[in-house]
Image (cartoon, rainbow, N blue to C red):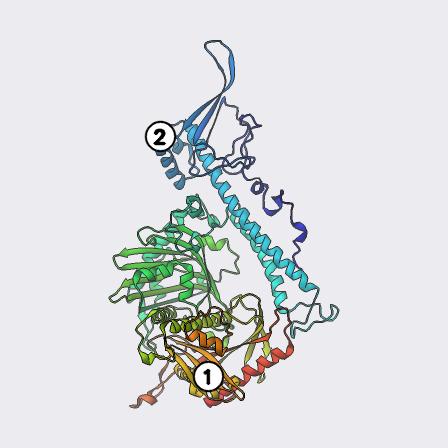
Amino acid sequence: MGVVDMSNNHPPPHETKDFFPSPALSLSLAGIFRDGGNGETEEVEDGSGSRGRPREESTVEISSETSGPLRSRGSDDDFEHDDITWNEDEEDPNNNSKKKKRKKYHRHTAEQIREMEALFKESPHPDEKQRQQLSKQLGLHPRQVKFWFQNRRTQIKAIQERHENSLLKAEIEKLREENKGLRKTLKNPSCPNCGLACSSNDAPTLPAEEHQLRIENARLRAEVEKLRAALGKYPIGTSPNNNSSSSCSGGNEEENRSALDYYTGIFGLEKSRIMHVVNQAMEEVKKMATSGEPLWIRSFETGREILNYDEYMKEFPTENSRDGRPNKRCIEASRETGIVFMELPRLVQTFMDVNQWKEMFPSMISKAATVDVICNGEGANCWDGAVQLMFAEVQMLTPVVGTREVYFVRYCKQLSVGQWAIVDVSVDKVEDNIDASLVKCRKLPSGCFLQEQSNAHCKVTWVEHLECQKSTVHSLYRVIVNSGQAFGARRWIATLQQQCERLLFSMATNIPTKDTTGVATLAGRKSILTLAQRMTWSFYRMLGASSYNTWNKIPSKTGQEDIRVASRKNLTDTGEPQGVILCAVSSIWLPVSRNLLFDFLKDETRRHEWDVMSNGGPAQSVANLAKGQDKGNAVSIQAVKLRENNMWILQDTCTNAYESAVVYAPVDIAGMQSVITGCDSSNTAVLPSGFSILPDGIESRGLVITSKPEDRSSEGGSLLTIAFQILTSNSPTAKLSKESVESVNNLLSCTLHKIKTSFQCDDAY
């Protein structure tokens, strides 16, 4: 694929037509009214962008009664809220002479504007009957009503064109910057395997990172063109909800209103259509959350609830008849209930603010965005009735299972005092206009019901209902993914409970002494927990199959594991070392229960059994901080005695009902000592490595009949993902060397071998 060269396509500042798909975009409103400078109107914009012939009637009226600015010929002056009538050649009764033209001004009343605005939201193109009826109701001439609607549509188009102009310019500027970087890399080709520089004759192939940038460059340009085709001239509305307070603040009305408030917005969807869909979804999720048998049947073997799909289709036949889609797609449905430690208003805020929502599920959500705010909420908390169009990328903590990207509408509704509902549903019209390669997963009516409990607790009932494209799944993860456990309600609830508990412990001031050792102050405790949280979130982002990483498979030392490597360059982030960073990841199955494997890896007294970097030296605890009721949720600082000096390791262990993780990183001793005293940890560089542990999805069941509990059951195995990061060079411009890849390969393979040896697992595993 060739590099997209945009350097020669940059137009002079006074030319804009090359940026847009049609001349109308670059002209904006400059040609809407042709007046020759004397106020005589020759043509009238009809609202659709076309121009009619010169009017033959003796009277032409133009109403610019609007709720916002309408500009012509690039003027910064707003039109008056008047109807202007020009009457040609009227006789003066006093002198019997003819006057050329006379202007009559008519200003609409506030009531007239309000009534026309109300009809405009329902029908921006009223028919003759509607115009006649409205004109009689308001005491206006039908032509005044007609031209008011024409001018209103023209104003909306102008506003949206300005939005599109800025968006497309930003996209093209981004492409231009990427293109400059790619052109530089062309001058210095290197081997994609080892990163060593070579001549253009020997290896014309770019390194994997640069090659990926070229692909991304072409994809971004194609995406711009697809957006143009899908949206016509109507742009994606900017999301005022990037700032959580924007939906509540007054501010600039034009800035805070969604594109969907202007007749049609993103992807041509009407607001009334979206509200109909979300209200139907709300009723469906209510039934799914509260119904028992026969809609939900509890499995005798596993105890999990299973959706009776035949009964579901009888209950909701119209909404879910999808032209034979189930033949090409699989349905996943799950339901789970749990108690979380968070006040109800704050929990609602967490779901509706996209940044807080992403932070509440760091191991699951790799990307999230509010694409558009369809309807702002009401009430003191500003969320009752709020509707947002959102995008999310959901991942597993392994690179061998692809992420799930989904567009959906989120609807927040207060059902009663102390009870709220958050409902998600994908909308067909949106997905029809998105690249089909992205629509591999869609949300059928899903969501959660939040019920206020005593002592700042909330009861959460979660329903997750997905329709996913059938695809090949890695053999290790086939059971847990195909059974719906990997992305199901149980995982969402377990993660939510864990994060709410972590927030509680991070803010608490009455932690027992036994749960905080080695740290003397609350400021020091908070600083350490903040640093550990940042380290763990960085680990989660690095570990998954998101487009953040470009994984390449390399052969392992034993030839039995799939090892994937990826490299990146850190130029500005002070939270991790600057330079070239190499990541290596491998996932394996072990015939060991998740809890047993987690306890082994987090135990500092057994660290020397698997940690190659410690060289067999013992680890001693410097500090230990609890961040949950389970002892497995803790942050510790460990001192490892090496041959010449000591090394400090910051370790964060996390566990819930679904998954566990052990994340650690070597830290500078002097810097860590200052953090312990309460100093700011934002500039403390950490490069995390660690483990993710999942159940293999095979439910535990009894193998023999016996009176001894220890012999009665047999737990399933574990899916262990191990990840290492190393800094290969302090210079961001350095190339990745073959020796670095070989070193991390040896490190990972040796660690896996030690873990298997500790559990007496045969290498066949």
> Would residue 230 be seen by someone viewing this image from the given angle?
yes
Q: Is residue 287 above or below residue 754?
A: above
Q: Which mark is residue 138?
A: 2
Q: Which mark is residue 381?
A: none
Residue linked to disc 1: 639
Question: Which residue sits at x=38%, y=68%?
Answer: 492
Q: Give whichever of 517, 164 is nearer the camera.
A: 517
Q: Is residue 223 above or below residue 539?
A: above
- Identify the secondary structure beneath mark 1: strand
* Disc 2 residue type (three-letter): Leu
| The quadrant where residue 419 appears | bottom left
Rendering coords of residue 456 (x, y %): 27, 66
Question: Which residue sits at x=53%, y=57%?
Answer: 435
Rendering coords of residue 162 (x, y %): 52, 44
Rendering coords of residue 57 (x, y %): 50, 23
Quarter of the figure with the N terminus:
bottom right
Q: Is residue 253 above or below residue 677?
A: above
